[in-house]
Amino acid sequence: METTTYSQALIEAIGGAANIRSLAMCMTRLRLELHDISRADLSAIRAIHHVLSVRRRGDAGVEVVFGPAIVNNVADDLSFLLDIPIARKNAKAVVKLTPAGPRRERPRTTGYVGRRRAMEHAPTTLSRDDLEHLKELLNSVDLASDEAPTGDGELGDCAILVLNGPNMNLLGVREPGIYGKNTYDDLVELCHRTAIAEGFGEVRCYQSNHEGDLVDAIQEARLSYDGIVLNPAAYTHTSVALLDALKAVGLSTVEVHMSAVMEREGFRQTSYVREACIALVAGEGLEGYAHAIRILAEHLRGTQPSSRK
């Protein structure tokens, strides 16, 4: 379903185009100021595909939470359909969910971000407000026992990067008999939810079809992240460059694959990056990412925070 369909459904549920006074957005949320809040049907908004949550905001506002990879397209659609500008919030602040001591501000990297036009999915970082709101969502639903919060606050100053290689943007379309029907948006949501449950202060999801972009992302993670969850996809079996980058930065890394690569074609038995990883998770589908994040959390709790030199 195209995002224009979501946008049109949202306009109808909000009381029509004439009822929308202004439009703003941040990393996951749309904020709509309305002329008449009573015309908004919150239940109908919640029923729209990819809407994670909706709530009233002040006397005349509605806040709608979408998955990070959807919200930009929906906002652009609404701006076009309604002929109103989008007020975009700055979501670049470093996120800390638990109190922490003084810390050097992280430099904002630009190398691979500047090439995002070549990628299906730009890097995804949630602001403090977004993560706090997702924590509220986390508390409002029942979680499986293995997803219950296990962190004790020790990771509140830690950040992790979830890095995905080629064709992962086509999840849900790409060989669903092997990779399942879940989408990349579902992957991003699961990673954020699990990282919050484990007590991480920041999690960023990044996907590229280009080897050099992945190398850049690993190199730049040296200054910004404490660990990496990595699915190199096809580059697993071919890329010495990714192995060298992981060795160079020295960050704790968990290799993850949705399929049981050890049971597939012979060429998939080789992993160049495994030498630089602390663990391998394979054959668990999308849930493998949650498993990998928990492994990384346990590992980081037992080590000193990285110096990020």
Image: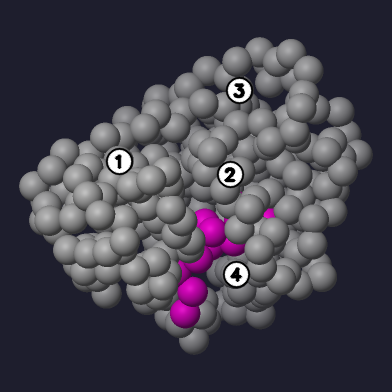
For marks 2 and 3, give the CA distance: 22 Å
Q: What residue sits 48% from the left and 61% below the top?
A: 53
Name the mark nearer the viewer: 2 or 4: 2
Task: Assess disc 2: are there few (<14), some (14-19) or many (≥20) residues with their C-alpha within 10 Å of its C-alpha.
Answer: many
Task: Please report the residue visible at 26 percent of the width from the left and 50 percent of the height from the top.
Answer: 34
Q: Label 4: which residue? A: 286
Please state which amino acid type lies under the numbered disc 1: Ala
Viewer-proximal residue among 185 and 9: 9
Does 41 sit left or right of 287 as displayed?
A: left
189 magenta-colored: yes
Q: Position of residue 302 (x, y in %)?
A: 91, 39
Which of the two residues, 269 or 95, is positioned nearer the viewer here?
A: 95
Callout 3: 10 Å neighbours few (<14), some, many (20+)?
some
Nearest to the eye among marks 2 and 1: give it: 1
Q: In which quadrant of the rendered view does residue 2 lie?
A: bottom left
Q: CA distance from mark 1 to mark 3?
A: 31 Å
Q: Earlier in the sequence, mark 1 or mark 3?
A: 1
Sequence-wise, which precedes: disc 2 or disc 1? 1
* Left-right relation of 24 to 106: left
**What amino acid is labelled 4 in the image?**
Leu
